Image (cartoon, rainbow, N blue to C red):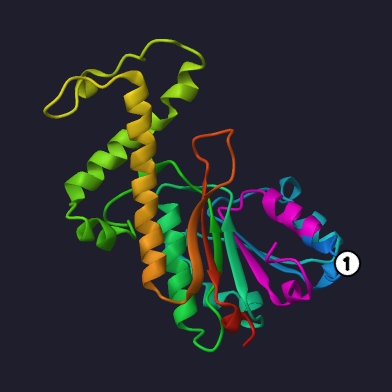
Amino acid sequence: EKLHGSATESFAFVDFCSGRGTLSDHLHAVLAADRNVTGESLKFVLVDWASLKVGHCRDGRMRSKGAHVTRVEADIADLCLADVPLLRETGPVAGYTKHACGPATDAVLRCVATFDAGRTKLPPTALILAPCCHHRCTWATYEGQAFFASLGLTSDDFATAVALSPWATLAEQSKGTQHALPLPDDEEALPGGPSPTFDRKVWLGRRCKHLLDLGRLHALKARGCFESVRLVQYTTLSVEDRLLVAWPRPTALDQ
């Protein structure tokens, strides 16, 4: 809702982990349908590490409808947004991901923070990120280290949270099974206690995923340049159901 209206035309949109660009194509269609927005004025940067066949991507379809589209083939960890010509000539920027697997979410946060640091006269990048695959997260790349330290938690606690996070998906894997799924031999019991029940495992897995995302939320809040930073539930169809949303202060957008 915040992106609707004439102010949308001043935005450039960065689709991290874009794949074929399907999400951006749909976003362009929705925004262009707004009578206050000229579809030809919308700008998109699609970022993905994979080399995709042109015919399989939505870039051409978007361009045929007037959108300005740049595709960047790069690892987000190595990406410098300031080097993208389309972003040198724009005002506010909004970045988003459909799924930012494991450390990709943290890479996006670092990439955007570096980009914003070089644009002191412009508002910070608005973010709408969908973290997933928490079991792939690494302590070295995790942006929530300060949050863990504030709770008295260590890298070992982080490793435990990462290891238990897949338990959140056990209910989906069982598809109606009434009994707990068997665990591998090295996961028969939590330290100092008996093996948890099936429902307890699912609960622990979800809480671990949430804890990891709270660390990222804390990192964004610590930047002190957003009107709001929230974790919101956007679907009930999957346990990967959270969005990390950060929105600049209105005064920043008016600059």
In this orientation, does residue 135 appear?
no
Query: In the rendered image, which quarter is residue 111 located in?
Result: bottom left
Q: At x 20% / y 45%, what residue is drawn?
A: 157
Q: At x 46% / y 17%, what residue is drawn?
A: 174
Secondary element at tag 1:
loop
To which residue does mark 1 refer? 35
Name the spot of residue 192 as percent of width and height, x first.
11, 28
Amino acid on which disc 1 is placed: Arg
7 up-or-down from 50: above or below: below
47 up-or-down from 117: above or below: above
Is 223 in front, or is 197? Answer: 197
Magenta stretch encompasses residue 8: yes
Name the spot of residue 189 as percent of width and height, x first.
19, 22
199 up-or-down from 208: above or below: above
- Seen in the image, is 236 located left or right of residue 78? right
Is 120 in front, or is 18? Answer: 120
